[in-house]
Every structure is written in C-alpha cells, then in structure tokens.
Image: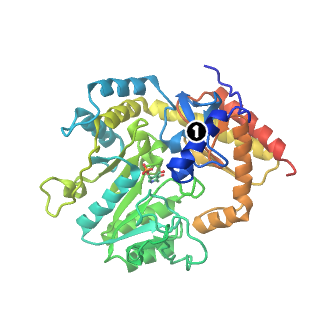
C-alpha cells in the first residue's frame, strides 16, 4: 500500500456534490450529525484502507481524525473485519446474552484500575447517562458537578456549559451553568454544579459547599475542548482526595481518553476514580459505550438490587459490537500502545521543529497518539483561556492550516492529529512535509 496521499483535486468532487444535493432534501442542512458538516459540501467516504480513507470520487486521504478517535486501528483492519464478518454470519443480536460481552468485560476489568465490574451501552453519551443514575442511586443525592467547557456527549444535563459565553458564564471562580440548547429547563441546570478546571482552591470550596447535594463529579481526565485544555495533576489529585472525604463519587469520562495508555488515562496519571465511562475504541469501530467501576457501586445495577437503577436497551451488549471490541482491544497490547506513543512523539517533535523553523509562536501539546499544533503562546489552563484564544484569532489560523493539509490529502481536526496503529513513520514524515508546505503557503497571509 502506498504511503503517499494523492492530494485532493478540486475537480474530483462531482459524486460527493451530487450526493449532497440529494441529502439536503432529506436531512436538515443535508447532515445527520453536526460533526460531519463541512462547507460547502462534505466528501462522502467510500471505503478505508488502514490509515487511509478513499472518498466516492477516488481521492485518497490520510485520516488523522479516525472518527473522533474511535478507529484506533484505522479502517478495515483485517482481524477486526474478520471478527465482524464471522459474527454477522452467526447473528447480529438476540435477547439472549453472548459470551462476547463477558470476554470484553473481562479484558477491561483486567486493564482499567477502577473497573471491577462492567455494564455496556450503545454510546458514550448513554454511558454517562447511566453513570449519573448510578451515582444518584448510590449516594441518594441529585446534583452533578462538571467542569466548565467539559464535553460528555449529548445528555442535556451534562451539556451544561460545554461552550458557554461571557454573557452568562458568571464569576470565573463560581461559574454559572449555561444551557447548550435553547429550551433547556432551568430546573435541569439547577442540578449542575460548574467547576473551574485547574483552580484547586475554588473547586475545593465548591465541593465542600455542595457536599450534601452532590452525587458525583465527572470529568475527562485527559483533555477538553479538542485537546487544548489539560487537567493538571494536582487538580486531579485534589478531586480524588476531596470527593472521597466528602462522600461524592468521582467519575472519569474516558470515552475519548482510554486510548492514552493500556490502562487508560487513570493508569497513566495514577489516579483511580470510582466509576469510569468508556466508548469509542472499546467497540472496534462499531457503536458502543460502557460503564465500569467499584463492585459495591455497580451493585445498584444488579437485577434484584434495592434501591436499583434500571438499565436495559435493545442493542445493549450486542454481539457485533462486543466481538469487534474484543478483537480490537486484544490487538492493543502494551507494545501496540508504545508504538502509537512513539509515532505520536515523532509527530510532535517534527511539529515543534516546524514551529521553530517558521518562527511561529506557540506550543505543541499532546500525549500518546494525540497531538495538538497550537499557534498560540499563552497558557490555556481552563475554558475561559481557551475562549479567549479562539475569539482572538486562533480558530481562523487553525482552520487555514486544516484546509491547507486537506488540500494535500490529510484529514485533521483543527490543530488536532489522532493517530492509528497502521500509520508508519513515512506517513508521519509525509504529514510533517505537508505541514511545512502549508505554513510556507500561509506566510504573510
Ligand atoms: C469525553 C467524551 N465523552 C462522551 C462522548 C460521547 O460519546 P458518543 O459520541 O459515543 O455518545 C465523547 C464523544 O466524543 C467524548 O469525547
């Protein structure tokens, strides 16, 4: 397989354009999910080959998005594809459980420090919904604390202040919960305690103040807002100590961040939460989510538990997602994680050198298979720093870079690169050359 993209030629898009014209008649704005929206029209995927996607017009594109980090083995990995095909020939779902759910649960219990027992769901969003119910049932309290700017999927409670704005976000030390969508009831927002990420003292104070109503604190322990804001180690440790002392559950949303290491971000940071939510890589490219944690807490999901959280779902634990997830996770050995991290480091080193060569003030962030090219010098320690950066021109700069890379056949997030196991050093070097060419082209603009 070649490791050079052909680049995207503007004249090779007729088929995508034509599909999009049809899409506009049957879906709002032509899309079924906002994330796929690209102006003036999206390129429709035809198939994938390892770390490459090929669109319906035949353009080959190096994929650094990997469906928002879920495709850790890229596309159509033969082992995962065989597991899916074999299971599809046996059955896709039934009311009876299959052994695959037990095998996948065993693998996760063995690897993830906080996980003694598992329940599966169909998405990360759903895993977080169940986590909230479990925390409320176990503690007998109703409020949930989350970070300002934190993303946990599409549950309206946890969407509060995902992207708040200055016209309502309040004092930085005691942020106000803002609705993410018009029509969200105030009563729902009243159940959320917003925490200022990385402000140890203000957060400690807020936890103490709301201790009698707080069931849980939830956060992504790795990064938020497209990887630009990182929870600092002393903040994570304070959260662990304080929640334990106050009888509040600590939930790590590792839907995204499980790919940081063999034992997730919690293993890499040495901080063990009470509950962990998962998704993306544990499904081998099929829809999935999961909630794991301490047995005494997970016990509220038991069939005869009193009090009990009801949890079911037509496709929960379906053998397709479980078999694909098991095949995919089994390939992710410690050596595979080391290899992902080494390639990530090669990319980050190269990006740093390019930043120096082109005298671009900024930083390169990231860890393991996740890298962020950030042409912004000031530290981004919380959502409000991030907001200042994006409204101060960062988004335009990143969008121009993203466009330049795509024109050379490389698909990235704005500033973000998410690697996959089939990527080679040649692919990384090709990306670095394309980045240098992109910045050359943007010079003086
Ligand atoms: C940290 C985090 N939590 C939750 C979710 C939601 O997962 P899903 O899209 O599977 O519902 C995501 C998705 O990107 C995520 O990054």
User: Picture quarter containing residue 12?
Assistant: top right
Indicate left or right for 373 with 250 as reference: right
Quadrant placement of the N terminus: top right
Of 61 and 118, which appears nearest the observer?
Answer: 61
Residue 339 visible in the shown view = yes
At 50% from the left and 73% from the top, the residue drawn is 178
Left or right: residue 48 compared with residue 62: left
Q: Quadrant of residue 206?
A: bottom left
Residue drawn where x is 74% and y is 49% of the image: 400
Most distant residue in the right direction: 444
- Residue 182: x and y, percent? 49, 70
Q: Nearer the viewer, residue 282 or 313?
A: 313
Number of numbered callouts drawn: 1
Q: Judge from the rendering whether residue 53 lies leftward or rightward of residue 188; answer left or right.
A: right
- Residue 117: % across, % down: 26, 47
Q: Residue at x 71, y 58 (%)?
A: 394
Which residue of the protein is positioned furthest toward the top in this rendering? Answer: 1
Q: Residue 78 at x, y = what percent?
A: 45, 23
**Would residue 438 appear left or right of 385 to someone viewing this image?**
right
Q: Nearer the viewer, residue 302 or 121?
A: 121
Residue ID for mark 1 = 19
Quarter location, residue 229: bottom right
Protein image colouring: rainbow
Q: Residue 272's spot in the image, x, y percent?
A: 37, 54
In front: 55, or 295? 55
């Amino acid at each position: 397989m070649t490791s050079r993209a052909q680049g995207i030629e503007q004249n090779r898009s007729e088929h995508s354009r034509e599909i999009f014209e049809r899409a506009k008649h049957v879906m709002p704005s032509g899309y079924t999910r906002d994330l796929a929206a690209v102006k003036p029209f999206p390129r429709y995927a035809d198939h994938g080959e390892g770390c490459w996607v090929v669109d319906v017009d035949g353009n080959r594109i190096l994929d650094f998005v990997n469906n928002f980090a879920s495709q850790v083995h890229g596309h159509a990995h033969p082992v995962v594809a065989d597991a899916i095909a074999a299971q599809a020939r046996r059955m896709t779902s039934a009311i009876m459980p299959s052994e695959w759910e037990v095998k996948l649960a065993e693998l996760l219990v063995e690897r993830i420090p906080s996980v003694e027992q598992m329940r599966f769901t169909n998405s990360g969003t759903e895993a977080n919904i169940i986590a909230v119910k479990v925390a409320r049932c176990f503690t007998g309290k109703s409020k949930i604390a989350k970070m300002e700017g934190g993303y946990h999927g599409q549950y309206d409670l946890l969407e509060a202040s995902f992207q708040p704005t200055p016209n309502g976000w309040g004092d930085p030390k005691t942020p106000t919960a803002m609705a993410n969508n018009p029509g969200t009831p105030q009563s729902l927002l009243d159940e959320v305690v917003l925490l200022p990420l990385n402000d140890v003292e203000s957060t400690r104070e807020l936890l103490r103040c709301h201790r009698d109503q707080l069931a849980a604190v939830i956060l992504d322990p790795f990064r938020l807002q497209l990887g630009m804001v990182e929870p600092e180690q002393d903040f994570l440790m304070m959260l662990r100590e304080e929640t334990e002392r106050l009888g509040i559950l600590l939930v790590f949303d590792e839907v995204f961040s499980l790919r940081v290491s063999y034992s997730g971000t919690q293993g890499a940071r040495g901080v063990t939460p009470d509950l962990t939510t998962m998704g993306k890589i544990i499904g081998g490219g099929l829809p999935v989510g999961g909630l794991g944690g301490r047995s005494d807490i997970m016990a509220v999901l038991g069939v005869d538990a009193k009090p009990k959280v009801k949890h079911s779902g037509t496709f929960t634990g379906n053998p397709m997602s479980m078999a694909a997830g098991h095949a995919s996770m089994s390939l992710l050995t410690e050596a595979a994680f080391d290899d992902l991290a080494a390639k990530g480091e090669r990319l980050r080193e190269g990006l740093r050198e390019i930043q120096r060569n082109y005298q671009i003030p900024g930083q390169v962030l990231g860890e393991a298979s996740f890298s962020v090219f950030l042409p912004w010098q000031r530290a981004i320690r919380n959502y409000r720093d991030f907001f200042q950066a994006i409204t101060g021109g960062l988004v335009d700069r990143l969008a121009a870079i993203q466009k330049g890379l795509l024109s050379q056949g490389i698909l990235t997030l704005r500033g973000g690169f998410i690697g996959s196991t089939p990527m080679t050093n040649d692919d990384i070097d090709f990306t670095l050359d394309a980045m240098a060419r992109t910045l050359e082209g943007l010079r003086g603009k």
